[in-house]
Every structure is written in structure tokens, then in C-alpha cells.
Image: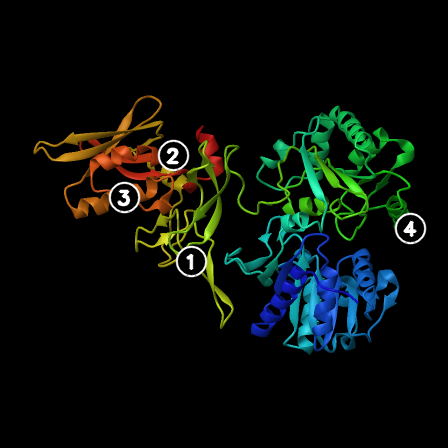
Amino acid sequence: MYKLRPYQQEAVDLTINHFKRTKDPAVITLPTGAGKSLVIAELAKMAQGRVLVLAHVKELVEQNYEKYISYGLQAGIYSAGLGRKDEDTKAIFGSVQSVANASDDFFEGYTLCVIDECHRVANEGETQYQKVIEKLGSKNPELCVLGLTATPYRLGLGWIYEYSHSGELRSNKPRFFKHCIYELPLTYMIENKYLTTPIKVDTPVTSYDFSELTEKGRMYTLAEVEELLKEQKRLTPLIIKNIINITELYKRQGVMIFSSTIRHAREILSYLPQDDARLVIGDTDSKDRDRIINDFKEKKFKYLVNVSVLTTGFDAPHVDVVAILRPTESVSLYQQIIGRGLRLDPGKKDCIILDYTGMGHNIYAPTIRERRPNKESVEVEVPCPQCGHKNIFWGTVNIDGEILEHSGRKCNGAGLDLDTMRPTPCGYRFRFKLCHSCGEQNDVSASECESCNTNLLDGDSKIKQAKLSKKMHVLRPEHIEFIEREDKNFRPFLEIKYYDCNAEHVSEYHFFNNESDFKRFNINFLRFHLKRPELELEVTQISEVLRMQPLFRSPSFVIARKQDKFWKVTEKIFSEELSSRYLSAQH
């Protein structure tokens, strides 16, 4: 039989506890090689009814089935591609395409549906996965749906579930999967010798420059990739020579090369040893593909080049070099590519990851959040002052690693109601836009107040409207000066001057004579100018403000209105309120 590892038992226990409380679809995140088949086996053994295990390709169906029956358990297969349509066993391993077209009788008696590589399940629409789940649910409204994946995110969508077991709200938009109930980090698997150690080498000798693609702020096309590779064609032979040198120098056994396009793959193949390299693409005949893959697994050749295939449902433990020559903004795809080289194999000490893309993905800590604001930005941990949740935002640090500034807008923490199993977001806002009608805090990008539905102008519109008025002045500050002054009655006040590149300036004034003055300054200036708004500092003296100058940030624009002979500052627009297009146009 089999024995569960401690983390596998924990995943099983948490799954059972979850479905006792709610039937909301849930996700378990296990890295490649974590033994998900053992988790499936234990859940199937404990299930009161039948269990359906779905996968999107026949290779994965067969792989999961073979591992399952190797534990001495009985199961069936329902997959046209594998030539079997079993219906009578307690556990069925099926391809979603075949199961979606099965007769109604097939769906009787299931209490658990497990979806492997569940990040492929679309959030909405009439998909084959949704069709299967609806049919299962019509037979059993108490059906439990469990997703398994090493990469719980999708390009363009982000996280595939709403609430994490860590207490973080991953998505405030509806997702098919509601909870991630267990997550095992890759570092645990490596430190405990369940996976081999990846040794990542960025730009080993040179790299393609794909920055032009990623800077477009949209999905890039195959034609754009082709054009870029054509311009940088001279780099390919140099890169392949480097791969061969590293392979020979460190006596590597199996090399997987991930290329960008079919033309690119064929070019790569032309520079590799003719008798020691093969190519697999989407159009490769299935029999030829199976033969090539089997020959590779049996070490009959060393270099396997592929295009957009062999990222899932492929298992060749001897792979000890992974070379990445294709751009991707998909963290999920990148993690799957890396996973091809992390399985253990006799005599294998590590796996060299050669990244020739220059895109800077992190193997251990994949980033699933907004694009990095600039090259100086790093991930920083920012505790919420309201709930204590430790948020991860982009930010800047000093030489000692202390946070200087961050771009966080809203706390991602949430509490879970154990009766309803629904998360309640913390709601604390680090940065916000105030509604001029009701005073409600809104997201800085909101176009309508969440409370009173009043239309809210974005920063771009405010600037454009101000520039159209003769009574308004728009200034882009290059420098801020804080000056302590006295009025004619010898009362001290603070003048804050905003200078542009032509030394023109506008000023705002603040008195510090009573509680109302203190509160007005803290609300109108301090809260918006602090580089770290969660510090929630309060001041009562001008001298305190002068000492705090390094903690303040400058607005991107200042808008002033003409009053008699003077300009009065009426609005300050900060970078997070502006579109990237508008910001770049102003440089």
C-alpha cells in the first residue's frame, strides 16, 4: 500500500474539514513532485461515494491513473484518447473532453470531483469543465469539487481563488474556487529533499531583449515575438553554444529547451548536435511524439526542444538542465517549465536553470500582483495598522533594508466567518480618493463613489479641466520647500512652496494654534504626503513637520485657483491617481 508524508496527511485533513463546513469549491496547491496522487488516493479511499478525477490531456489522465493503481487500488479510465470508457469503478480518471460528452447515467453517485491542473478551469462561460460540474451537481447537490495545481493563477486573471488559508483575500472578484485550503511552498520540498535543488542562472552568456514586448502593457502577439527574434538572430547560436558547453562541462544527462516559435525551435535544433537532439511541437504526429518522448526518457538523446508543449503531464526525472529561450509573463507557465527539471533521479544532484529571456522571474516567490513600478522597486512587507495582516507590496528600501515608500493601496487581509465560510475584507486603505459629496474613502482609480454613487473624476480629467480654465494654474513640482513664518500678529504658520523646473511656485499655508488646526493639517496634508501612510503620524508643532520632511512625498501635479492677486492650492494629484499613459506624456 502507501504511507502519506506529513504534509500530504495535513492536506487531506484540511480538505475533509473544509467540506464538512461548506461545499464551496476549494484548491490545494502542491508543487510538482509533491505526490498529489497520494492525496487523491487517500481522499478516494475516504469518500462515501464515487470519485471523478479530471485532467485536460490524456497523458495526465494516464499518469495519474498509473500512479493510483500502483498503490494496489482499483480504478477506471474514461478517455477516448486512451481507448477506454470505464464506468463501474469507485474511482474514475477521465479526460474532461470525453467526460463532458458522456451519457447522463455516467454522472450518478459521485460525491467528489478532483480537477488536476485546475488553473485551467475558466472562471465563467460554457466550458467543458463547467458542463461536467453542472451534470455532477444535478445528480448530487452536495458534490465537493477540489482543485489541484502547482500554480493557482492565470495570466490576465490573477489568482484563481478568492480566499487564502493565510488570511489573505486574493481576489475581490468572484472566482469559481472560493478557498485555498492548503499550500505547500517549493522551498519546503527542496529543503526536505523531496525535489532537487534548482540552480538558476540569469543571462548565462547573453540574453534576448524582450523588454519591448513587456513594456506594451498588453498581451504580445506571435508575430511580434518573431520580429524581435529576427532582429536578434545573431544571439541564438551564441546561446546554444553556451547551453552545450554547460551541458558537457557539468556532465548533464537531459536538457529541455523551451523555444518561442516553431521557426525559432528549428533554428535552435540546427545548432545542436544532429544525432543528440529532437524537436516536439504541437503539430508533431502523436505516434512520433510518443516515440520521441520515450527515447528521451530512456536517454537515447540528450537535447529535447519544444514549443508550447511538455509543460504539464510530462515526467522525465533525469532532466538536469532547463533552458528558457521564450518570453512569458505567465507566472504559471514559468513555474511549470521550471518544474520539468525538479524531480528526483538517482545520481542527480541539482538542476541548472538557464534563463536567456532577461525577464527576471523568481522561482521561489512568484509575483502575482500589479506590474513592478520601476527597476528600483522590490517586494516589501507592510503590516496593516487595522488588522495586522502582513501585506506584500512593491516599494523602495534604503541600504539597511528599511522601507522608504510603498505603492500599496488597500489591505489584502480578511477574516473568515466560520459559520458561513465567507471572508470579510479588512478594508483598510493605505491610499484612497475622497468623495467630495459624502467623504467616503474610495480606491484611487474609482470612477464612482462606493457609498453614494457620485461620479468621481480621475487625475487625468482634473488636470485637463484645470488647463482649460484661465482661473486655474497647473504646476508640476520639482522641489518642495517648508518654511516657518509669522503673520502680522506674530502667530507662527507653515508655508509649503511647490516649485516647478522654471522656479515658478505656488504655496499653501497651515497654522498650528489649536486642535482644529492640527486635525486640518493631519487630514489635508499628512495623510496624503506620507510615503508610508500606515504610520498614521500626527503633529502639533511646525518643528515636528520640519524634522519629518524625509518622510514626505511630492505630488505629481498641483492645481491652484486664482483668488484676487494670489493663487490658492485647491488640489494635489499624486502618481497613483494618473494613468501611465498620461504620466509618460508629461515627461
Q: Sort mark 4 into few (<14), some (14-19) or many (20+) by Cα contacts within 10 Å.
A: few
Would you say residue 471 is visible in this rendering?
no
Asked if residue 81 lies left or right of residue 387, the reply is: right
Residue 114: x and y in percent read 70, 65
Which amino acid does the dot numbered 4 rest on?
Answer: Lys
Give the Cα separation between the discs numbered 2 and 3: 16 Å
Q: Residue at x 37, y 37 (%)?
A: 463
Which amino acid does the dot numbered 2 rest on?
Answer: Ser
Residue 459: x and y in percent read 39, 41
Element under disc 3: helix
Residue at the extreme top of the image, as rendered: 502
Examine the rendered structure and indicate whether residue 334 appears above or below residue 86. Answer: above
The label on residue 426 is 1
State the quadrant of the C terminus.
top left
Give the Cα separation between the discs numbered 1 and 2: 29 Å
Residue 248: x and y in percent read 82, 30
> Mark 4 or mark 1, which has the lower sequence index?
4
Element under disc 2: loop
User: In terms of depth relative to the viewer, which is nearer, 282 or 409?
Assistant: 409
User: In terms of depth relative to the viewer, which is nearer, 185 or 507?
Assistant: 185
Asked if residue 16 lies left or right of residue 380, the reply is: right
Q: Residue at x 31, y 33 (%)?
A: 549
Which residue, given by chain and number where applicable, does mark 3 sit on? 524
The label on residue 575 is none
Which residue, given by chain and number where applicable, does mark 4 sit on? 287
> Mark 1 or mark 3, which has the lower sequence index?
1
Give the Cα separation between the discs numbered 4 and 3: 70 Å
Give the Cα separation between the discs numbered 1 and 3: 24 Å
Give the Cα separation between the discs numbered 4 and 1: 55 Å
Which residue, given by chain and number where applicable, does mark 2 sit on? 556
User: In terms of depth relative to the viewer, which is nearer, 562 or 70?
Assistant: 70
User: In terms of depth relative to the viewer, which is nearer, 4 or 557?
Assistant: 4
